[in-house]
């Protein structure tokens, strides 16, 4: 078990603003930190001569095709160039807010003349990016690992000048290890036990993500998914009500974000799209049932924590789409609770999702993710409603299990061990294109 204080600390660390897809941001942060390291002698900054990037296959796959805020193109080479030119690693997942027309033009020039090289480190897994920047007079190299902004090593001119504290990492891992072994019911009880005022901050993220959805509904970005869903005659095909409304808002926010829109959203478990998928459906469901702000905050916090819990089992970056497998499943659990489900009903909502969405592949971050999470968010509403009425898939069905915890472990097994070869094949297809 983790304590209420540890839960709150975890939420504050996990629920932070992000601008643009977090995989390009990860590379940009590493590049910015490398530049800062190269220039740490205080001398007048020399121009950037070259940038060399090595990432895990997961970061490479997720960053290939996704839009970058303030930049017309895509690609991790552009993300690295932008990060190096911005040179503000402390901006974290909001680093692309520093993109200006001049920086975008300079980054395009660096990429056009072949000054940026990007390669896959086949030995790396999960969140990993190593960026080396040569500035003429010095070379800086920074490594991000374990989290999208978690710098663990710095090198200057080939010599290590800083390494993250092993004690701090071990302390965080201890909390996460204990969370990973908890029951879903225990997480719910923890949220219910927390002082209402201590959870109110998560509603700021709801407001931020609502603004992203509003912006996405009117912006000319992506391929037009949300625009079609917003049309009046779409209701004649899809119907009206909570599920279509959630699907439309999730699609609008996600399409705008992954299409390169310069709009912040509140992330969850290290990813902005996960934050959209966790908060928008739960907030809409809370409004539909007339929940108080306090109960809404509890539901949103519960969804964030279940999202983190599932990510601990499946992995933040995997062969399966974790925005669907983790975030939409977490949203279903929270919505079931809002609809009046008890512990057993919340577990049924998770089982319903595991029996429905397990196996949806991750083929990188891109505008098309908006369609995936939109459809899965509709499934989350259905799964939650059924569970609240006592209807759930049988434990004997496929990868489902008696408990929500075992159902999640089964889904994780499919997405990690079972789909390892599929993940490599997906990346190969993407590179061949």
Image (tube, rainbow, N blue to C red):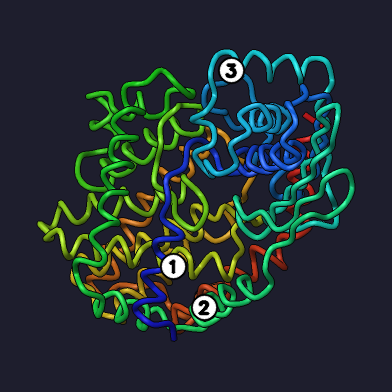
Q: CA distance from mark 2 to mark 3?
A: 41 Å
Q: CA distance from mark 3 to mark 1?
A: 35 Å
Residue located at (44% from left, 67% from top): 10
Q: Position of residue 255 (x, y in %)?
A: 45, 32
Judge depth for marks 3 and 1 and give the one in front. Answer: 1
Q: Which mark is residue 10?
A: 1
Q: Residues within 10 Å of mark 2 (few under 14, many from 20)?
A: some
Q: CA distance from mark 2 to mark 1?
A: 9 Å
Residue picked out by circle 3: 72
Q: Are marks 2 and 3 in contact (CB under 8 Å)?
A: no
- Secondary element under disc 3, as helix, strand or loop, is loop
Where 426 sits versus 339, above or below? above
Q: Earlier in the sequence, mark 2 or mark 3?
A: 3
- Secondary element under disc 2, as helix, strand or loop, is helix
Q: Position of residue 68 (x, y in %)?
A: 57, 28
Q: Residues within 10 Å of mark 3 (few under 14, many from 20)?
A: few
Instruction: For the C terminus, give its image quadrant.
Output: top right
- Secondary element under disc 1, as helix, strand or loop, is helix
Q: Quadrant of residue 145?
A: bottom right
> 138 or 89: which is nearer to us?
138
Q: Is residue 220 left or right of residue 427?
A: left
Q: Quadrant of residue 189?
A: bottom left
Q: Position of residue 398 (x, y in %)?
A: 55, 72
Q: Position of residue 432 (x, y in %)?
A: 81, 32
Q: Residues within 10 Å of mark 1 (few under 14, many from 20)?
A: some
Residue picked out by circle 2: 175
Q: Is residue 393 left or right of residue 310?
A: left
Q: Earlier in the sequence, mark 2 or mark 1?
A: 1
């Amino acid at each position: 078990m983790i304590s209420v204080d540890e839960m709150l600390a975890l939420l504050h660390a996990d629920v932070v603003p992000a601008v643009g897809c977090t995989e390009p941001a990860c590379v940009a942060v590493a590049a910015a930190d490398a530049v800062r390291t190269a220039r740490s002698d205080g001398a007048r900054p020399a121009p950037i001569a070259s940038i060399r990037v090595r990432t895990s296959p997961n970061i490479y796959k997720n960053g290939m095709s996704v839009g970058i805020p303030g930049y017309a193109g895509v690609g991790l080479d552009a993300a690295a160039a932008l990060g190096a030119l911005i040179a503000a690693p402390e901006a974290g997942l909001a680093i692309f807010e520093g993109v200006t027309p001049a920086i975008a033009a300079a980054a395009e020039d660096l990429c056009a003349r072949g000054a940026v090289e990007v390669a896959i480190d086949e030995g790396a897994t999960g969140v990993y990016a190593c960026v080396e920047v040569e500035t003429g007079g010095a070379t800086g190299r920074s490594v991000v690992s374990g989290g999208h902004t978690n710098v663990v090593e710095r090198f200057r001119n080939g010599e290590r000048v800083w390494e993250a504290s092993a004690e701090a990492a071990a302390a965080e891992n201890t909390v996460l290890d204990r969370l990973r072994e908890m029951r879903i019911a225990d997480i719910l009880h923890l949220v219910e036990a927390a002082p209402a005022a201590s959870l109110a901050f998560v509603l700021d993220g709801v407001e931020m993500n609502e603004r992203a959805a509003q912006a996405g509904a009117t912006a000319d970005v992506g391929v037009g998914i949300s625009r079609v869903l917003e049309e009046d005659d779409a209701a004649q095909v899809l119907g009206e009500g909570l599920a279509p409304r959630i699907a439309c808002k999730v699609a609008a926010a996600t399409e705008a974000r992954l299409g390169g829109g310069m709009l912040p959203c509140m992330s969850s478990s290290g990813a902005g799209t996960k934050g959209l998928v966790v908060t928008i459906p739960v907030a809409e469901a809370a409004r539909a049932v007339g929940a108080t702000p306090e109960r809404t905050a509890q539901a949103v916090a519960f969804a964030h924590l279940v999202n983190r819990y599932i990510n601990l089992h499946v992995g933040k970056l995997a062969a399966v789409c974790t925005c669907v497998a983790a975030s939409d499943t977490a949203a279903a659990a929270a919505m079931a609770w809002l609809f009046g489900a008890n512990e057993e009903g919340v577990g049924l909502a998770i089982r319903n999702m595991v029996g429905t969405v397990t196996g949806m592949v991750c083929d990188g971050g891109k505008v098309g993710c908006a369609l995936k999470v939109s459809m899965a968010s509709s499934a989350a509403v259905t799964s939650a409603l059924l569970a609240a009425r006592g209807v759930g898939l049988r434990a004997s069905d496929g990868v489902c299990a008696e408990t929500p915890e075992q159902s999640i472990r089964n889904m994780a097994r499919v997405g990690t061990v079972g789909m390892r070869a599929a993940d490599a094949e997906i990346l190969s297809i993407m590179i061949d294109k």
